[in-house]
Amino acid sequence: MDIKELQEKAKNFIDERDWRQFQTVKELAINTSVEANELLELFQWRDGKEIDALLKFGKDPELYKKIQNETSDVFFSALAIADHLNFDLGEAFLSKMDALAKRYKTDEVKGKVIKIPEYQG
């Protein structure tokens, strides 16, 4: 299923429940943050490398499922914002990836953890 189909599925889900009346871009952005923080909470006070090892080797299927669910909630929120503002999330993503590729040139950042200011000079 492509992004447009997923965006349509989210739109239909919202419309079938008559939730659009409660949605503003502000409320949807807040929801995105809340959902992202629920995802982040799954990792709080835990060692990142240990979590990676557990998940990669299937040793914590319950945590894996929770991560899938919370990540899906964040994605749903992004789809809802795109629907609310009537933009193609797939096109927006590809445009952002192009901008990031120009900002973080492979030969300059490969293997480095750096943040390049968006506007230099």
Image (cartoon, rainbow, N blue to C red):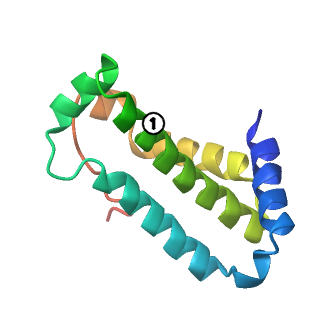
Where residue 8 appears, x then y in whole percent?
Answer: 83, 52
> Can you tell which quarter of the image residue 107 is in?
top left
Where residue 108 appears, x then y in whole percent?
Answer: 29, 33
Query: Along the line of sight, which residue is nearer the eye, 58 or 79?
Result: 58
Which residue is at 38% across, 59% downward? 38
Which residue is at 57% across, 42% downward? 98
Query: Along the line of sight, which residue is nearer the eye, 115 or 37?
Result: 37
* SS state under label 1: helix
Specify the quadrant that holds the N terminus.
top right
- The image shows residue 43, relative to residue 24, as above or below, that is above
- The image shows residue 47, relative to residue 10, as above or below, that is above
> Can you tell which quarter of the image residue 78 is in?
bottom right
Which residue is at 31% across, 65% downward? 121
Q: Residue furthest top?
A: 57
- The image shows residue 114, relative to residue 119, as above or below, that is above
Q: Is residue 76 left or right of residue 107?
A: right
Where residue 6 appears, x then y in whole percent?
Answer: 75, 45
Q: Amino acid at mark 1?
A: Lys
Where residue 20 appears, x then y in whole percent?
Answer: 77, 76
- The image shows residue 99, relative to residue 21, as above or below, that is above
Residue under numbered circle 1: 65
Q: Residue furthest front?
A: 62
Query: Along the line of sight, which residue is nearer the eye, 105 or 43?
Result: 43
Q: Is residue 2 left or right of residue 114?
A: right
How many marks the image carries: the answer is: 1
Local crowd size for mark 1, using a 10 Å CA cut-off: few (<14), some (14–19), many (≥20):
few
> Can you tell which quarter of the image residue 4 is in?
top right
Which residue is at 45% across, 36% downward? 65
